[in-house]
Image: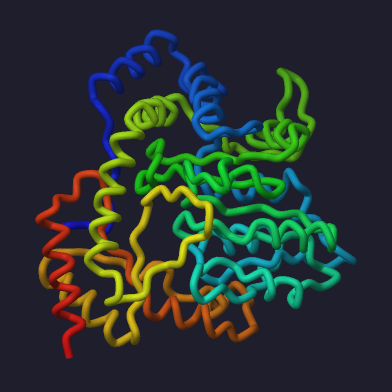
């Protein structure tokens, strides 16, 4: 079986050394030394400041919303946040869970990121924030989005779950917005088994969020914030430190897979148009077919040969009833119906890649 992705497992001996240290210190959570070390190393590796580790990527979004105050009602009605329908469910459901109404705006037909020209038309008196997604690690039009946010006094929280290590115009893409969130789920390029992080623009927002992830507790007898338990533990941090040590070899192997796919499939299917001045992380390889029928045929053909591809992201989220989407968003709906993500991971063999490519070609034949 060839899965659509496979968790990267680092050197076991090194991981054991970190775990031995955890046993010796008997310190498993509550901002332990490995969490502190991983925070420092990630800030250095990513070229950012004000990074906060949390227990998963969904809580990273929810803590960011609350730290920035966008969950507070407006005129005694729920706040709204403009976001994309072409994303993983957590981007929108985390808003809804916190009492914020997601308002969907359509995406760009080539980059598949939230189109700035559709954002402004969706702004109402209830709008408190814009929540764009760097889809598959591709940069949103951050300059245009930031300009819209400044014009209307809105917060910007980028869901950057796919954008680990991505550089845009020579700097970390995570520096844009009031906050950018990361997922460190096991399937991600960089992972801690489960986990996530928030990168804040301002230190005061980091400090508020730091209180929130520990129940609002700031001392043995002091509670200053409404909080929740969103802390990363030492075992998660140990995995992250080991994975970070081996990032360069992991990236090189994934990039080789990505480049091979691109070389063999360009012209046969639609590929995502990447933003200019972007250093990509080869985290995903999505392709778009001419029709949904082709997608279903190719996916079934791959499955018959024990290869799992994924319709990612499908369905377009404005069609999910409990999210309350009302607008018809034709571009997102079309891309979502015709997209397929191919297997890509560190240990995917060239022979396996060739088999996948040939099956796609045969599925495209009339």
Q: Would you say residue 32 is visible in this rendering?
A: yes
Residue 194 vs residue 146, the one in the foreground: 146
Q: Residue 69: where, in percent of width, then height? A: 78, 49
320 relative position to 15: left or right: right
Q: Residue 163: where, in percent of width, then height? A: 49, 49
Name of the residue lying farthest toward the bottom: 366
Residue 244 vs residue 31, the one in the foreground: 244
Name of the residue lying farthest toward the right: 75
Q: Residue at x 20, y 45 (%)?
A: 347
Q: Residue at x 29, y 35 (%)?
A: 249
- Above or below — where is 344 with respect to 105? above
* Residue 366 sits in quarter: bottom left
Q: Residue 167: where, in percent of width, then height? A: 52, 44
Q: Say how the picture is coloured.
A: rainbow
- Above or below — where is 312 with respect to 159? below
Name of the residue lying farthest toward the top: 24
218 relative position to 115: left or right: right
Q: Residue at x 81, y 73 (%)?
A: 124
Residue 350 vs residue 67, the one in the foreground: 350
- Above or below — where is 57 with respect to 106? above
Q: How many marks?
A: 0
Q: Would you say residue 59 is visible in this rendering?
A: no
- Above or below — where is 72 with respect to 166? below
Q: Quadrant of the N terminus?
A: bottom left
Q: Residue 339: where, in percent of width, then height? A: 37, 74
Q: Residue at x 35, y 48 (%)?
A: 187
């Amino acid at each position: 079986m060839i899965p659509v992705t496979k968790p990267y497992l680092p050197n076991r001996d090194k991981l054991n050394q970190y775990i031995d240290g955890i046993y010796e210190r008997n310190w498993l959570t509550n901002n332990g030394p490995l969490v502190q070390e991983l925070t420092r190393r990630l800030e250095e590796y990513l070229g950012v400041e004000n990074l906060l580790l949390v227990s998963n990527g969904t809580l990273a979004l929810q803590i960011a919303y609350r730290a920035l105050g966008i969950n507070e009602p407006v005129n005694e009605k729920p706040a709204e946040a403009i976001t994309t329908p072409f994303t993983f469910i957590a981007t929108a459901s985390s808003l809804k869970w916190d009492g914020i109404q997601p308002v969907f705006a359509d995406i760009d037909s080539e980059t598949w990121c939230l189109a700035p020209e559709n954002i402004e038309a969706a702004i109402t008196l209830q709008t408190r924030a814009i929540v764009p997604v760097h889809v598959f690690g591709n940069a949103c039009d951050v300059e245009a989005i930031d300009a819209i946010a400044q014009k209307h006094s809105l917060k910007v929280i980028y869901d950057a779950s796919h954008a680990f290590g991505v550089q845009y115009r020579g700097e970390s893409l995570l520096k844009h917005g009031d906050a950018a969130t990361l997922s460190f789920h096991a399937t991600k390029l960089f992972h801690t088994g489960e986990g996530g992080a928030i990168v804040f623009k301002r230190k005061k927002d980091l400090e508020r969020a730091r209180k929130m992830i520990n129940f609002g507790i700031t001392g043995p007898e002091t509670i200053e914030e409404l909080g929740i338990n969103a802390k990363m533990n030492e075992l998660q941090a140990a995995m992250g430190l080991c994975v970070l040590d081996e990032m360069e070899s992991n990236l090189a192997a994934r990039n080789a897979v990505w480049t091979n796919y691109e070389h063999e499939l360009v012209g046969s299917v639609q590929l995502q148009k990447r933003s200019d001045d972007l250093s990509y992380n080869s985290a995903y390889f999505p392709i778009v077919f001419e029709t949904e029928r082709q997608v279903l045929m190719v996916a079934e053909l791959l499955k018959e040969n024990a290869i799992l591809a994924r319709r990612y992201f499908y369905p377009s989220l404005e069609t999910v009833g409990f999210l309350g989407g009302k607008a018809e968003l034709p571009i997102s709906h079309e891309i979502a119906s015709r997209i397929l993500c191919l297997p890509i991971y560190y240990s995917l063999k060239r022979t396996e890649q060739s088999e996948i490519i040939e099956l796609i070609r045969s599925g495209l034949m009339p």
